[in-house]
């Protein structure tokens, strides 16, 4: 079950906590994985840790020229085929609506939504050319994109847009054996949440029925399932991994 032997995958934001966990989950199931991101030293360290079946394909998602070439470069590095795309990379530029700067809005939309669109488009084209009847596109959204969050109008908009975009893509490619789904993590223990102090962490945990933050590995497990052959009849869906914080 969940055997990805012979499959190839591209994971963006692979140097982060959730990204690295997704890479390890896919790689552990037998996939050859292309690790992408801006922090080349961290990507190379992870690739070295994994050993074989791991390649590094750097990309700055804020640079459209780089994004436009990423799938092509990944396909070459992976031996000529891409089976799985995981759009995990993202950023926050939090601010209240009334004082949010145009640049904060533009940067978040560019990295979180526009680059995801561009990579989905390129990956879908590549998967269709494979004519294998198999393709998996997994976009990492957020609970903020479902319920909103004060100070995150830009981030919530980007993640809500990602969910709607993924549904549209799913309808277009389902008859070719390609699925497109989202994962919407809740609060997960990563460097992004480590900036919270103990009191903030305790208060947030009280709002979560599971009474704790999630782990990157739990997100990785969800990605592994959606990437598998066993998930072939699931498409256009959002898998909520949040300890019961949001029951949709």
Image (cartoon, rainbow, N blue to C red):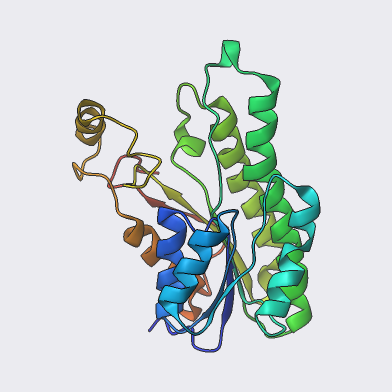
The quadrant the C terminus occupies is top left
Q: Nearer the viewer, residue 24 or 143?
A: 24
Q: Nearer the viewer, residue 202 or 37?
A: 37
How far across and how far down the image is residue 219, in percent?
38, 58
Q: Residue at x 60, y 33 (%)?
A: 157
Q: Residue at x 74, y 82 (%)?
A: 130
Q: How many marks?
A: 0
How far across and how far down the image is residue 58, in percent?
64, 61
How far across and how far down the image is residue 247, in percent?
35, 43
Vertical placement of 163 versus 9: above or below? Answer: above
Left or right placement of residue 5 versus residue 79 in this view: left
Left or right placement of residue 22 versus residue 116 in this view: left
Return the residue found at the far bottom.
6
Q: Nearer the viewer, residue 166 or 55?
A: 55
Examine the rendering and report whether any part of residue 226 can be seen: no
Residue 196 position by quadrant: top left
Left or right placement of residue 214 versus residue 129 in this view: left
Vertical placement of 115 versus 224: above or below? Answer: above
How far across and how far down the image is residue 76, in percent?
73, 79
Q: Residue at x 41, y 74 (%)?
A: 49
Return the residue found at the far top.
98
The quadrant the N terminus occupies is bottom left
């Amino acid at each position: 079950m969940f055997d990805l032997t012979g499959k190839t995958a591209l994971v963006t934001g692979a140097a982060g906590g959730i990204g690295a966990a997704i890479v390890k989950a896919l790689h552990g199931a037998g996939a050859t994985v292309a690790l992408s991101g801006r922090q080349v030293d961290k990507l190379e360290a992870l690739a070295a840790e994994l050993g074989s079946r791991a390649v590094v394909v750097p990309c700055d998602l804020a640079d459209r020229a780089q994004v436009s070439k990423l799938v092509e470069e990944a396909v070459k590095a992976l031996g000529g085929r891409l089976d799985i795309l995981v759009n995990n990379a993202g950023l926050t530029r939090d601010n209240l609506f009334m004082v949010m700067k145009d640049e904060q809005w533009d940067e978040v939309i560019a990295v979180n939504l526009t680059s995801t669109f561009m990579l989905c488009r390129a990956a879908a084209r590549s998967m269709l050319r494979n004519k294998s009847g198999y393709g998996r596109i997994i976009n990492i959204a957020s609970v903020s994109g479902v319920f909103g969050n004060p100070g995150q109008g830009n981030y919530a908009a980007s993640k809500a847009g990602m969910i709607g975009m993924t549904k549209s893509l799913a309808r277009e490619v389902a008859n070719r054996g390609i699925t497109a789904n989202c994962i919407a993590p809740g609060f997960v223990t990563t460097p992004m949440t480590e900036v919270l102090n103990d009191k903030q962490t305790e208060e947030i945990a009280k709002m979560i029925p599971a009474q704790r933050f999630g782990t990157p590995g739990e997100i990785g497990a969800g990605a592994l399932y959606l990437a598998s052959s066993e998930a072939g009849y699931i498409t256009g869906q959002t898998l909520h991994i949040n300890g019961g914080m949001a029951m949709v």
